[in-house]
Amino acid sequence: MFSASPQFAAACAILRTLREAGYEAYLAGGCVRDLLLGREPNDYDVTTSARPEAVLRMFPRTFAVGAHFGVVLVAQVDESEAAETNFVTEVATFRCDGAYSDGRRPDAVQYTLSATDDVQRRDFTINGLLLDPLRPAADLHSAVIDHVGGVADLRTGVVRAIGTAERRFEEDHLRMLRGVRFSARLGFSLEAETAAGISHLAARTAFVSRERVRDELTKMLTEGHARRAFELLDETGLLAEVLPEIARMKGVEQPPQFHPEGDVWTHTLLLLDHLEAGCSPTLAWGALLHDVGKPATFRRAERIRFDGHVAMGVAIGTEICRRFRFSNDESRQILALIENHMRFMDAPRMKAATLKRFFRLDGFAEHLALHKMDCLAAKGGIETWELVRQSWQAMPEDAVRPQPLLTGRELINVGYAPGAAFKEMLHAVEDAQLEGLITTPEEALRLVRQRFGAATPVAES
């Protein structure tokens, strides 16, 4: 048994059904690669000589989401567990692709009965392997069918395009970013012709939808090898094409007393090295962009300065979030991480009210995580991070967000006329409450009268 997962069992059940109907069928692509590397695949894909209409007839629950390109989704239910689990397996018909005039999808496909022809259209040799798990008494390696040299490349740790690299990248420009991601995630090198093809065609990524580019970059940032991914993006020329704002960090000096590690680019790479696999996309992008305002604000005075780099960073980050079409919630959090990353240096001197309001930031755990990485990528001291973390964890929620002692309605009830001053009054009350100076509505009203004067009686007409 190559895998004990129910997803693997579901894929094998599809293979059996196809084989019993007289069709050729194999596991294909990334799942085979991962099994050979000793990793549990996230999903399983099947490739078969059966045409889409045959697959649609053969299984009771199917979705023809890509039938035009020979792709059908087959849904199965695992009833062996207490709660039913749905598994969806992609089943693709052997095919040869026509021209890719849009740099993403083939204009037309031609079905074939040859698995050998089918794998030639795929991107990289390590993703072009087939597996026959139903072969009698087969071990993993003897069950692999390799028409492209992918087994050897897996053994030596190489990401190599199938056939001619530039042709593969002309077909689908996103493959250049995928090649970088696979190389970083697996710790593999980019084969020389493949790397040269990426460098030559890097500018073609401008024709890829920003959402697809965003998703590839997000995977690079969250798969646990972000630093290597961005080094490869830089080495291949892709970084200047997809994120020129990050490429501009190179050579931007920093004051050595605060950043002995080097320029802004070096600092950012060191910070990315601390991003853990599975971290949230917003933390990952906040980490990447936290110093994006520094190149535009660099100046030399008595020392190197970056006056206003946070505000500039928020402005540049806003444009990047818009360009890559992040959701409103994602954009807000990414920009908040940029906007607040320098506030930690003031935290030991913050008054209680200011600190508690700091803790109210949405996703404060991400702000803490970014600050720690920022410190570790610079001088290395995390004393402030530890101080803030302990205070945040020890502080009860009702101390950070206490019930208001006074509202605008109550101010009206005691005779204050609604107006712009209400905001200042209520802020002063909350400030005193957070500082622990007042604890009752009566004390709150007394503070308002002392600071803003008594309510002016409304004259009767």
Image: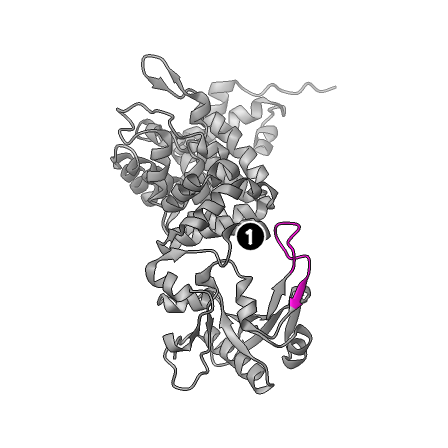
Which residue is painted at 44% across and 47% down in the image? 195
Residue 158 versus residue 301 in the image, above or below: below
Residue 351's x, y, as percent?
A: 35, 28
Label 1 neighbour load within 10 Å: few <14, some 14-19, many 20+: some
Which residue is painted at 47% across and 19% down in the image? 451
Residue 251's x, y, as percent?
A: 37, 27
**Corner quadrant of residue 109:** bottom right
Which residue is painted at 34% across and 29% down in the image? 263
246 or 314, nearer to the observer: 246
Residues in magenta, as a range: 98-110
Looking at the rendered structure, the secondary structure element under dot 1 is helix
Quadrant where the C terminus sits is: top right
Residue at the farthest top position: 302
167 or 171, nearer to the observer: 167
Residue 363's x, y, as percent?
A: 44, 44
336 or 147, nearer to the observer: 147
Chief SS of the magenta region: loop
* Residue position for label 1: 167
Regarding residue 294, the answer to whether it shows in the image is yes
Disc 1 marks which amino acid? Arg
